[in-house]
Structures are given as structure tokens and as C-alpha cells.
Image (cartoon, coloured by chain):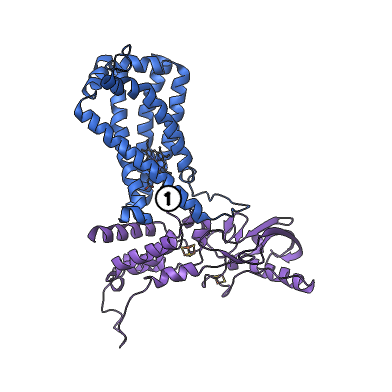
Chain colours: A blue, B purple
Amino acid sequence: MWLLNSSIGKKVVMSLTGLFLILFLTFHMSMNLVAIFSAEGYNAVCEFLGANWYALAGTAVIAAGAVLHILFALWLTYINRRARGKDRYKVSERPKEVEWASQNMLVLGIIVVIGIALHLYQFWFKMQFNEITGILPEVNPHDGYALIAETLGNPIMAVIYLVWFAAIWFHLTHGFWSAIQTLGWNNKIWLSRWKCISNIYTTILCLGFAVVAIYFGFIA
Amino acid sequence: MEKNINITLRIWRQKGPKEKGAFKEYSLQNISTESSFLEMLDVLNEQLINNGEDPVVFDHDCREGICGMCSLYINGHPHGPDEDVTTCQLHMRKFNDGDVITVEPWRSAGFPVIRDLMVDRSAFDKIMQAGGYISVNTGGVPDANAIPIPKANADEAMDAATCIGCGACVAACKNGSAMLFVSAKVSQLALLPQGRIEAARRAKAMLSKMDELGFGNCTNTGACEAECPKNISITNIARLNREFIKAKLKD
Ligand code: HEM
Ligand code: SF4
Ligand code: FES
């Protein structure tokens, strides 16, 4: 199967799962913004995406995408380190054309994973998981708004979330156009356009997340 | 303006592929800034030979930037700090009096060191043999204008064809990937009608040879393009990806 045993095939898996996760983040960010304007509105969204079959199926698909992305990231990084060889250069300079993020995708990804673990524990575990299992009877799984207000109301937690969003920003300013390039959808004219679109899209995405953290951490 | 400078060289010395290597320092006096980097190394080797020591082994041939034999990772850059030139075209005027210049071989699992600064780049020949050609019948030479080719395609194919196969892209890549080289060699033919016929087979064969020989996976950092002496564009890599994905989807 070429997606598994060729270098471009493995990259296509990285690219498609990465783009899918960007799409998911876009929906997630849009829903978060509702919380700034209306507690009822936000809780209505939470109820809609509670523990019914379509929300669970969606969650499973997103989880599968994330797991594939992470497994392929580790696999590719392993092969790449082996291809680099045992001996390292004594003196090495990063050319100015090379983005810092592009050479640190794994490190950024690991920060993102830690953020995801924290986030799943603080929200998913207390909401969707709690609704199915009833493991935490004292938490109302449908009152997402109260959960946000309580969690991000702690300014330290808000800052931790902001660091997480910054890592995602760096990951995606490179990842977005890189995914397009991997799919071969690039040429001399579009190369700089895709890089520009990557920067703008990622900045809007991360600002959307950041606004919510800043609002609950420092304003509300 | 011509002047003479004194420099210190920190050069990787390694007796053989299996031997352990180490850096060794040499000082050189009165090197003309008019001389090329390789001429400077010739001066060093002459001194070493006169002192009864082994000369530093490095690859070179044409010394005019077209054959792709010269290599050397100089002060953190393949082909040295100058832009868009090969090591043989690098001049000592790019350096200052008192500089310490670190010279290393290409370091990549696909290019094992043979001796000192010379590495084995025969992997590139194997990739070319896997499909970097067109099959033609011998016979009369066809008329040059019999097949019309759009100017834009001809230009891009010519740009891709300027790749001299030096391997600086692999040396620069944190993933030890040969994608820039392979994509240039696939593109120079894929863009022309004569090369289109075998395009799908070529992309698959050259890429799987590259993978088989232990080169890494491209993560689009662009270090290859920045360090390539011939300014080969990474849009060629997009074309290779496209050719490969299309070929696989058709299978
Ligand atoms: C918020 C979730 C994430 C999104 C939206 C995302 C998105 C992307 C995208 C679009 C790419 C570019 C793919 C390509 O170059 O073809 C990418 C590459 C990469 N990602 Fe992620 N990613 C996420 C999380 C992670 C995590 C958790 C890890 C690792 C532990 C990770 C590790 C990597 C690595 C190492 C690469 C570079 C691999 C390569 O280009 O071959 N990512 N990511
Ligand atoms: S693409 Fe550039 S750096 Fe790579 S082998 Fe060709 S000329 Fe050398
Ligand atoms: S020696 Fe031929 S390109 Fe440098």
C-alpha cells in the first residue's frame, strides 16, 4: 500500500490528517466564540454535541485522525533521523529562508499533545465522557459555560492555554502550506500565496481561540 | 582589491569509511583573496605533502561550477557562505583575516564518507538509473521544431535541468532527503512531451529507489532550495508529489 510504504504516501497521510484537524479546529474555534456572547447559546451547542450518536461518531473520527497524525509524525521523524546519519555537523547555520517552525514540527507537536491531554481531562472527561458514564455526578455535563468560566477563570490556566495556542500557531503557519505542497498542489505563483494564506488563516484561527481564553481569564 | 589574509582551517580528517574521524586545525599564511577556496586547499595540501603528511582528500573536477563534483560543508553551509555558487566558485574574498573556517564533509546516511571530505554519492547515480532518462529509438535526428513546446514549460524544464547532482540539498536537509534532486530530475523530463510518455513510471521508480537507498522524507523546510548552488525551486518537489500521487491513484 503506497500510503504506508513510500515516503510521499506517508506524507500524504500526514497532510490529509493535518488538514482534517485544521478543519476541526476551525469549527471548534467558531463554537467557542459563542461563549463570549451568550451562556445559553453556548450550552445549547454543548447539548447538541453531547453524547448522541453523531457527536460520538464525530469524536471517534477526530480521535482517529489525531492518532494517525501523531503515529505517522513519530514514524517519519524516526526515519528522518536515521537518514540524517549518526554524525552531526559541528557548525550549522539555518538559512534565513528556512522557517524556524518547519524544523521543529515534532517539538511543537509534543507541546500540542500535552495541551490536548490537559484539555481533554478538563473538558471532554467532565462533559461527553461524564454524560455517558456518570462518573462525576456533581458536574453537570450540559453546563459547558460554567466549566469554561471555572477553568479559564484562573488566569494561570488561561496563560497555559495561550501558550498552547501559540504552539499550534507555529505548527500551522508551516503545516498548512506544507500540507498543500505535499499534495502537489503548488507552483511558482502559488508558493508564496499559500504561505501567505497559511499565515492569515492560522492567525485568525489562533486569535479566535485566544480571545476566549483572554476573555474568561482576565475580563469576565 | 587583492590582499593577503591569514586563516585557521578546522578540517574533518577521516582515514576511511569505517575509521573514526576528528577535526584537525591548520593555519595558513598569506592566502590571496583572489584565489578560490579550492586553490587555497591546494596550497594547504602542498604544505602537507612537503611536511610528509597525508594531503586532505576532497572531490573536485571542472572547477567552473558545472560538473557537480565539488562538495564541502563550509562554516555551516553546503558550498560555503556565498549564495548560488558551488564550492569551486567560492573565493577567499568572502573571508577575513584571522577567520577560523570549519570544513566538513556532507553528512547524511545516504552519502557515507570515503575519506576526509570525500563522500560516496553513487546513490544519485542509482536513482538516475532507476528512471532518469527517456527511451528513444536510434535513427535520424528529428527536426527540432516538429514538436511545439510552450515557452513557459521549456523554461521551467531548463531551470530544473541546471541541477548538477552535487548533493548539497541532501547535505542541507535535516531529514537527509534527496527530494530536491529527484524532483529536478523528474521535472526536467515531465515538463516536455518527450518525457511525458514515461512520466508515471519514472516518478514511481526514482522515488522508490530514493526511499530504498535510505534518504529521508521531505518536510518542506526549504533548506535545500536555500543552499542549492543552482537555485532549484521546491515547486519541483510539488510537481514530483503530484506526478507520484497521480500515478498511484491510477494504478
Ligand atoms: C492541533 C492539532 C494538529 C494539527 C491541526 C496539525 C496539522 C499539521 C499539518 C497540516 C501538517 C503538515 C503536513 C505536511 O507537511 O504534509 C503537520 C505536520 C506535522 N505534525 Fe501536526 N498537527 C497537529 C498536531 C500534531 C501533534 C500532536 C503532533 C505530534 C506529536 C504533530 C506532529 C507533526 C509533525 C512532526 C509534522 C511534520 C511531519 C512532516 O511534515 O512530515 N502534529 N501537522
Ligand atoms: S538540486 Fe541543487 S543542491 Fe541538489 S543536487 Fe541538484 S544542484 Fe545540487
Ligand atoms: S568542481 Fe565541478 S562544479 Fe565544482
Q: Is residue B173 visible?
A: no
Left or right: B57 with respect to A39?
A: right
Q: Mark 1 is on which residue type?
A: Thr
Residue, far bottom = B140
- Residue A133 locus on image (x, y percent): 28, 20
Residue underneath mark 1: B219
Q: Is residue A168 visible?
A: yes
Residue, far left = A53
Q: Residues within 10 Å of mark 1 (few under 14, many from 20)?
A: many
- Residue B201 locus on image (x, y percent): 30, 67
Report the quarter where the N terminus of chain B lies: bottom right
**Which image quadrant is residue B54 in?**
bottom right
> Which chain is indicated by disc 1?
B
Confirm or reject: label 1 Cβ below 8 Å from ligand 1. yes
Q: Residue at x 38, y 71 (%)?
A: B132
Q: Is residue A54 above or below residue A158?
A: below
Left or right: B28 with respect to B108?
A: right
- Residue B236 locus on image (x, y percent): 38, 60
- Residue B50 locus on image (x, y percent): 78, 74
Report the quarter where the C terminus of chain B lies: bottom left
Foreground: A186 or B206? B206
Secondary structure beneath dot 1 equals: loop
Foreground: A14 or A192? A14
